[in-house]
Amino acid sequence: DSGVTQTPKHLITATGQRVTLRCSPRSGDLSVYWYQQSLDQGLQFLIQYYNGEERAKGNILERFSAQQFPDLHSELNLSSLELGDSALYFCASSVEAGGGGELFFGEGSRLTVL
Amino acid sequence: GQNIDQPTEMTATEGAIVQINCTYQTSGFNGLFWYQQHAGEAPTFLSYNVLDGLEEKGRFSSFLSRSKGYSYLLLKELQMKDSASYLCAALLMNRDDKIIFGKGTRLHILP
């Protein structure tokens, strides 16, 4: 158990819908990262937050947004869903902002868009 | 652009040694991670190299050459449970900091 909690574990929805994925980092970790993993693309970096502030952005689509709350949990919002958004979404946390520390990954949220 | 390359799949025999290579072309490179990911599970940390050279940790060792943009993960005395994907990832520190991953190498262990 990494100490990172993600909900829901599985989610099935339809195209055009909107979903919210939630992540609670390990106790004491200030950085939260979101990654998307699909079969042929590997882990794609989406966005990173540190202590409530956006720290780094990857190839995150405009239909996607995220935030980190004062209690340090984070939410990833995916809207106007398309079939291609079906993937495993991982949240990871670390102590440091600079990313030099180990990332601890949650179990992931598997999103299926029908 | 930022690019990390590693072989898609490798096969090795139980008890043997295997080396998984990773090359990267990035800007702002600061260090190289290796993670292990079993099918359907979360990635777990194996190693982090900042300086050139070999770091050994039990049956696993990781090597980095910053001048060559090259790293490898060496797995010794392979066990069936080592069947997994191995992900190479680079820490990039530019205007912002990010960790980007290669597509992973799926390692199959044969008895």
Image (cartoon, rainbow, N blue to C red):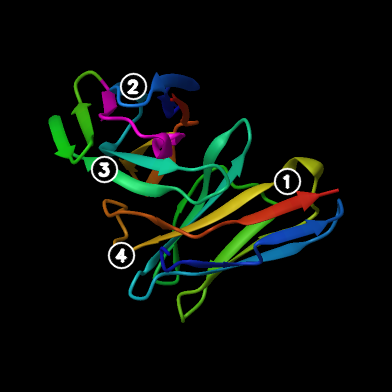
Question: Residue A24 at x, y = what percent?
Answer: 50, 72
Q: Which residue is mark 1?
A: A86
Q: Amino acid at mark 3?
A: Ser
Query: Callout 4: residue from which chain?
Result: A
Q: Which residue is mark 2?
A: B21
Task: Identify which residue, A97 or A109, lies in the foreground.
Answer: A109
* Type of amino acid under label 4: Val
Residue B25 lies in quadrant? top left
Q: Give how far apart the Cα atoms at labels 2 and 4 are.
A: 28 Å
Residue under circle 4? A95
* Region of the chain picked out in magenta, as a range: B69-85
Asked where in the image residue A59 lies, by quadrant, the reply is top right
In the rendered image, residue B100 lying in the magenta stretch gets the answer: no
Say if residue B96 shows up in the picture. Answer: no
Seen at 23% across and 32% down, the residue is B62
The residue sitting at 62% across, 30% down in the picture is A40
The three-letter amino acid code for the residue at tag 2 is Asn
Q: Is residue A36 left or right of residue B72?
A: right
Categorize mark 2 by other alpha carbons within 10 Å: few (<14), some (14-19), many (20+): some
- Residue A114, compared with residue A109, is above or below; it is above
Residue at figure coordinates x 47%, y 31% from the top left: B104
Label ID, residue B90:
none
Give the camera-side residue of B25 and B57: B57
